[in-house]
Image: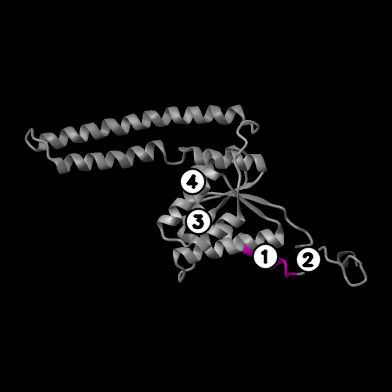
Amino acid sequence: MAEYPLKQRFVLDTSLFLSEEIRDDDETFEEGIERLLDTIAAARLDLNISCYMPPSIAAELEHILRERGVSEDVLGKLDTWVIKKHPDRYEVYIPAEVVYRFIDEMSDRVNRGLRVSEKAVRKAEESKQRSNGGSKLSDVDKVISDLREDYRGALRQGVLDSREDFDLLILARELNAGVVTEDTGIISWAADFGLRNLRGRAFPTLLEEYLMALDSPRPWSRNDDGVDADRL
């Protein structure tokens, strides 16, 4: 163990493991995840850095990894080194200002969603008129496809849109932990929750830097006579 363990905690999001940014150019999807988990294991053993996930996110991630053919050995490492913990939803308090902002933002997004829908209806009507009163299925399908994309962007992008996202923030607040994610919505709300946050792409490098620092001389180290070198 390190002489001066950092005792930091991080709550990890699914997007950390799925990001292409955490993999080297010559690594496969599975190799990149295994290297990340090995780094998390070393940080736990040598630096006492703990990584957590709400069970809801852990189940989501495991399902995705199995679909992509990740081996049971790698899934076993995930289960071993990333701690699964339910957030204490009854004891963790959220400032009223955060709830107020969430309600205000959702009201604004509903209005934006309505405008997107109205635009799609007008496009469908114009398409119908161009086809001399008939209805071309391909045109309607295109309008529906555009509507789905625009509606998703108006209502979901940059906002908490799932229980899993909320569980992650509540757990991080409970543990006073940093949030590791690539999700811009979670990053934005982590700031409102008063939480430290780190982009997933930077997390492996952070742990590696901490681990390399173990072998470097420390400014607080003492010489063989037990004298603080900085005080000489």
Mark in the foreground, 1 or 2: 1
Mark 4 residue type: Thr
Graded by Cα atoms within 10 Å as few (under 14), some (14 to 19) or many (20 or more), the crowding at tag 2 reads: few
Mark 2 residue type: Arg
Q: Is residue 197 visible?
A: no
Picture layout, residue 5 above or below residue 96: below
User: Could you tell me residue 203's position as x and y percent?
Assistant: 58, 57
Instruction: Give the CA separation, mark 3 to mark 2.
Output: 32 Å
Do the numbered discs 1 and 2 sit on residues whose CB atoms are within 8 Å?
no
Callout 1: SS: helix
Check disc 4 and report the residue beneath it: 184
Q: Which quarter of the image is occupied by the N terminus?
A: bottom right
Q: Is residue 55 visible?
A: yes
User: Could you tell me residue 49's position as x and y percent?
Assistant: 68, 55
Which residues fall within the magenta stretch? Answer: 207-216
Mark 1 residue type: Leu
Check disc 3 and report the residue beneath it: 17
Instruction: Give the CA separation, mark 4 to mark 3.
Output: 15 Å
Graded by Cα atoms within 10 Å as few (under 14), some (14 to 19) or many (20 or more), the crowding at tag 1 reads: some
Left or right of 104 on screen, residue 127 = left
Instruction: Give the CA separation, mark 2 to mark 4.
Output: 36 Å
Residue at 15%, 37% in the rendered image: 127
Mark 3 residue type: Phe
Mark in the foreground, 3 or 2: 3
Instruction: Give the CA separation, mark 1 to mark 2.
Output: 13 Å
Name the disc covering residue 218, or none: 2
Callout 3: SS: helix
Q: Earlier in the sequence, mark 4 or mark 3?
A: 3
